[in-house]
Image (cartoon, rainbow, N blue to C red):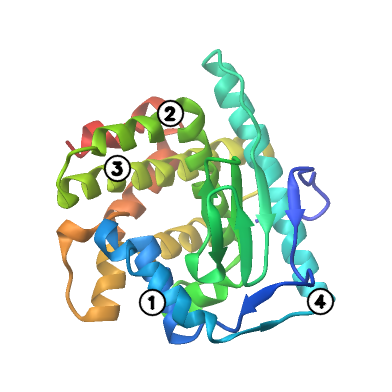
Amino acid sequence: MKWIGRRQSDNMEDRRGMSGGKVALGGGVIGIIILLINLFGGQNAQQLTPVLEQLQGGQQTEQTAVELTPEQKQLGEFAATVLADTEDVWKKIFAENNLTYEEPKMVLFTSNVETACGSATAASGPFYCPADKKVYMDLAFFEELKSRFGAEGGDFAIAYVIAHEVGHHVQNLLGTSTKMRRDQEGLSEADANKLSVALELQADFYAGLWTHYNENMNNVLEAGDIQEALSAANAVGDDAIQSKMQGHVVPDSFTHGTSEQRMYWFNKGFKSGDINQGDTFKALN
């Protein structure tokens, strides 16, 4: 992705290397289990997260301030540029629909972070907190995605994930996520999970839609960028993760969608450029 020398967002909070407090070391096996539960485990499985995090707490230590390397600084600048692009694109899309876009903030952190949605560790993976309208990311996640889950890597894999999380912010602004949580009330876990899948696939669609608009506005794509995004989407499909971690898949426990679904909806957003084609709830009904 062509990004050097372009506008960076003012809505970035870079907390990497900050001193003070307890942080978890490295993640290890427990950290990986927590990440998978949070991203793919469903409602009952998520109840195990506090227990595992307590176990992980035994691996904690004090951290002092750490100077960021030139590579880390450049990665932060890249993330700020992608965030700026999401601002420009979603302002345009909202304006086309007679709406006003409210920009989210993005927090880069290392190991652990305090949010309006509670405490989180790097094991949670990238996430969006609707209570403070912020995207939280430990950029070390992308090395994990590459080394453990088989994604190709590359800068556009990071752009895809940022755009996906900003897609959740869009859903929050439009009331989609609130409606989904209301619709989940009283449903079985399997049926509630289906709505979660629709929400996540729509965020993938929005990531593809952003890519479409951003390319038209800024001509930023380079050879291999779309493949990097699709490889990341493929790697974090529920079926791919479950097959890799437990040797079999349990479709009723899916919360994010299969690899095929995630790639399909990203591609649909990218190729159509039409926000009205992103009703995943109706399509999966």
Disc 2 element:
helix
| Label 3: how many Cα within 10 Å (few below 14, some 14–19, many 20+) | many
Real-space CA distance between mark 3 and mark 1, rounded to the nearest whole angstrom: 24 Å
Question: Which of the two discs, 4 and 1, labels the residue nearer the N terminus?
Answer: 1
Q: Are marks 2 and 3 in contact (CB under 8 Å)?
A: no
Query: Residue 66, percent across and down?
Result: 81, 77
Real-space CA distance between mark 2 and mark 3, rounded to the nearest whole angstrom: 15 Å
- Residue at horizontal 45%, vertical 34%? 171
Query: Residue 113, percent across and down?
Result: 63, 62
Picture quarter containing residue 131? top right
**177 over 55 or under it: above or below:** above
- Residue at horizontal 53%, vertical 86%? 58
Real-space CA distance between mark 2 and mark 4, rounded to the nearest whole angstrom: 39 Å
Dot 2 amino acid type: Ile
Q: Which mark is residue 33?
A: 1
Nearer to the camera, 215 or 79: 79
Dot 1 amino acid type: Ile
| Label 2: how many Cα within 10 Å (few below 14, some 14–19, many 20+) | some
Q: Which mark is residue 198?
A: 3
Question: Which of the two discs, 2 and 3, labels the residue nearer the N terminus?
Answer: 3
Question: Which of the two discs, 1 and 2, labels the residue nearer the N terminus?
Answer: 1
- Badge 2 is on which residue? 275
- Badge 4 is on which residue? 69
Residue 2 appears in the picture as rendered: no
- Residue at horizontal 45%, vertical 72%? 151
Query: Residue 19, percent across and down?
Result: 79, 72
Q: Are marks 2 and 4 in contact (CB under 8 Å)?
A: no
- Residue at horizontal 61%, vertical 39%? 214
